[in-house]
Amino acid sequence: MKRISTLLVAGACIFTSSAHAVDPTPIQPAKPEVIGAIKGWTGNEGLKLSLPVTKFQLKNGLTVLLVEDHSVPMVSYHTWYRVGSRDETPGVTGAAHMLEHMMFKGAKKYDGKAFDRIFHENGISNNAFTTNDYTGFYQNLPSDKLELVMDMEVDRMSALALKPEDLKSEKQVVMEERRWRVDNNPMGVVRETMMGTVFKTNAYHWPVIGYMKDIEKYDSEKLRFFYNTYYVPNNAILVLVGDFDTPKVKSLIEKYYGALEYRPLPRREYPKERPQTVQQNAVVRKDVQNSSFIVAFQSPAQGEPDMYALDLAANILGNGTSSRLYKRLVYQKQVATSTYAFNYAMKEAGVYATGVMMKPGVDYKESLDIIYNELWKIRNTKVSDVELQKAKTQVIKELVDSLKTMDGKARALAVNEIVTGSYDNLFKDMEKYQAVTADDIKRVSEKYTNQTQRSIIVLEPKQKKGAANE
Amino acid sequence: MNKLAQTLTLPIVCVALASCAGKKSKTGGSEQPAAGYSAPRSAGSFKLMPFKEVVLENGLKIIYVRDNSLPRLSLTVLFKTGNMQEPKDLAGLNAMTAYLLEQGTQTRDAMKIADEFGQMGTSLDVSPGYDVTTVYADALTSNSTQLLQLFSDVLMNPAFKDIEINRLRSQILASLQKKVDNPSAFADEQMDKFLYGDHPYGRDTSGTPEGLRALRKQDIIKHYLTFYRPNNATMAVVGQFDDEFEKQLQEAMGKWTKRTIPALTAAPAPAIDDLKVKLIVKKGLQQTQIRISQVGIERKDNDFIPLRMANESLGGSFGSRLNQKVRDDLGLTYSIYSGFDARKDRGSFDISTFTKNETAAKALDETLKVVKDYVESGATEQETVAARNQLVGQFPRAIETSDRLAYNLLVLDYYNISYDYLTDYISNVNKLKQKDTNAAMKRHVDPTKFKVIVYGNDSIIPQFKDYKPEIVRMAK
């Protein structure tokens, strides 16, 4: 009765969840996926990636990226808007996400349940997501359905229905989503607590899905204001990868999207996060089997120079069974079931964190000291060349692997265009990771991971259980 | 924050499939496949990437798929062993054996193995299952020789050291104990148990605490020597490699010794004679998980595709009846889906959803109503056309990458189903009529004979009075 999210037509799911299922960590932004011409491959040095991207902008400000790819007769169609939870204010948290849901509830030409129905009838798969910084809608469609999808996307970009009665039932759906992601999921609570602890003044303080009390109160007028402000062509990017003819698609886009009106965006001023100067602690107590904790720090925004070295530092600390934390806590001391580390860079700022899931019955305090020690080591001693090379290979391989599919390519281009301002940064990233030195890793660790800059989030069982160590 | 965390193993659709013939194929510019490679195709479908099969003297079947679009390659081995091949009192034997492969060989210890894979930017991905167990690793082409050396070493020379056995055992026991904190995974596990009883499909693929504690080193060695054999495995080699690498690989894998593989069967899952509801109650839960299941089909059943198509309209997408009613109209959930999980032995037909504690019984009532109505009256012609379009239109994604194609070939090979399944898929789906899929649904799903697991807090108990449920309370 397990489901896997892979497209397997031949039959039964033969992959099942493993006993070593990774504990949830914050959803990483879609890592740039890079497929295409790869030149001069010798080791990893001189590895170059590129995709044949056609980029243009309509008069109304809509940015378009096209990549022809005829590997299968399909198109991956992505429409992303530069609006996310950072554009909300206290009291209406989660509004961007709620609006994402309402985008499936009918517009002018395609009204009522037409979106679900027409996608379904035409063999098109579709979904959407909301993050702190942007909202994305995507379809994977047979290539002969391209004009239909265009017509539908233009309709909901320009004339969303937003009916109060639809909002009423969809609010219930979003409340269930929140219970599922957060309230009934201890790790979801920990994640929400972490973001709220690391960020005090900027909009990353609240969760993308919003607080329950805010979800209950949305009204369609508030959402309409949100929609009218941000769902405009000059705040959107369109990325198409797949089986089409570029000149032909270009003229179709001009035909369908050309009539939409440019609307000036409000000046957006996001409160800057003040640098942290004193350690923050948060404890969550739930009816759970085991303790776990996160040690988190503020880190630089997406694309800032220090991001690359921190990504590699996180990899060395916590990525996989050859990482420092796994070896020490899971393998040698055998006190934890899993460890992880990540650097999650967003548009305004990032979170750099390490986490440990204890075995049931094992106290976390000694492991917390070990984490402090590992953070101290990486601040004070240079990582070895072998470790550095390993981290680079892992990061670069992940980049290469993410470009296997049309959908992967589209996502990679979209996230780079929207978060860094140009899709091209996707291809420059490789060189930036390659250029990181052991000194850089030591330097950024010293800069961002001191005792006064850390936030400790602990999840503890309400009742102590007997040790279950064998 | 997806609109729906859809985890459906469903293929894709279009009405008139544009043929990609004549366009540049994905095999990286080499218009002609290498010697021995062929690209099967049939009328009305597009070409599969070229691949070839080789069987070694020790019985290992190797499927090669060359793909030069990226400088990488992957190795997968599928062993025909899983829960089905282990005794109940040693449940966990197969998972322990599989996970221990990378915990030390005759010449490398566990940490050296982890480091060597890590250095290549990869790791060994081991998945023990109900019927099969897969082992996968990939690397950049520049590391292909190292990858082969390491991969063949863990497959052929595992050390099974006591210290590693105990380390892993403790690790898996901890993971099993923690499952209760994940309501969705816990509900799945309880449903398996309720539906399959003592059948091997009723147990977690990682085993049971009793089985894990009982098994000994000699059990693991015996299991390995019996089932982890070249003549009980199929291998897929995918990506950028040349003739020389094929030669190297066959030389390395040829050293593996074959043995006679015993055939095992399991007693069938218990029959269900009416609707049976089990409430599992735990304090503090903020939401109720609901699972509705009955025993379904074997993968080799001829109704496999008709049922997949019939399920599209019932619970296979946003446009399906269950999603439109229970989520969209009633606002009772964020996610509801149904599906057939076909396996070597009879798999299951499952419906999975969750709702707030207050509406647990209502969600079950409404779901069962939709299912009953659908099985009895069938899909409309419009729904049938939509389902057909979904299957056909989304199909190309299932073989979009060489890895996905290879994985599908491995699975087909395991079930002894011809690869024509892929080349003829579209024409076979196009042949299916409304009456075919409706009849298949009627044949295989009985809306009056489900087993149901409901996992929520105390407040759900009074809601289910009419179902006369069995009630289990979780100890604090």
Image (tube, rainbow, N blue to C red):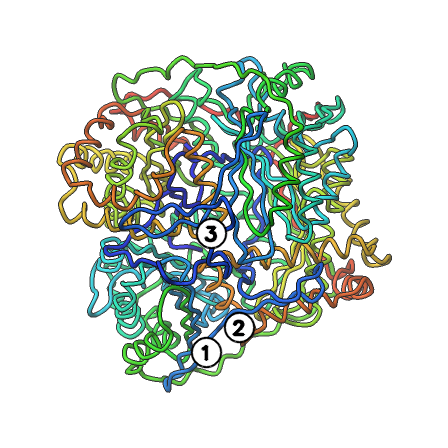
Task: Give the percent coordinates (x, y) of residue A12.
Answer: 40, 34
- Which residue matches tag 2? A423
User: Could you classify mark 1 by the number of other residues whose Cα lies within 10 Å: few (under 14), some (14-19), or many (20 or more)?
Assistant: some
- Say whether mark 3 and mark 2 are on the same chain: no
Work out whether residue A453 or residue A121 is closer to the camera in this orientation and state it.
Answer: A121
Task: Give the percent coordinates (x, y) of residue B273.
Answer: 26, 16
Q: Residue at x 70, y 42 (%)?
A: A321
Q: Provide the secondary structure element on which disc 1 rests.
A: strand
- Position of the N terminus of chain B by quadrant: bottom left
Q: Which mark is residue A74?
A: none
Please state the chain letter of the residue tagged with numbered disc 3 in the rendered image: B
- Say whether mark 2 and mark 1 are on the same chain: yes
Tell me the kind of residue under disc 3: Thr
Work out whether residue B468 or residue B132 is closer to the camera in this orientation and state it.
Answer: B132
- Position of the C terminus of chain B by quadrant: top right
User: Could you classify mark 2 by the number of other residues whose Cα lies within 10 Å: few (under 14), some (14-19), or many (20 or more)?
Assistant: many
Distance from Cα at disc 2 to Cα at disc 3:
23 Å
Work out whether residue B339 or residue B337 is closer to the camera in this orientation and state it.
Answer: B339
Q: Is residue A307 left or right of residue B32?
A: right
Q: Is residue B337 left or right of residue A55?
A: left
Task: Give the percent coordinates (x, y) of residue A359.
Answer: 67, 33
Which numbered disc, 1 or 2, marks the residue that appears first in the sequence? 1
- Which residue matches tag 3? B401
Q: Is residue A68 left or right of residue B141?
A: left
Tell me the kind of residue under disc 1: Lys
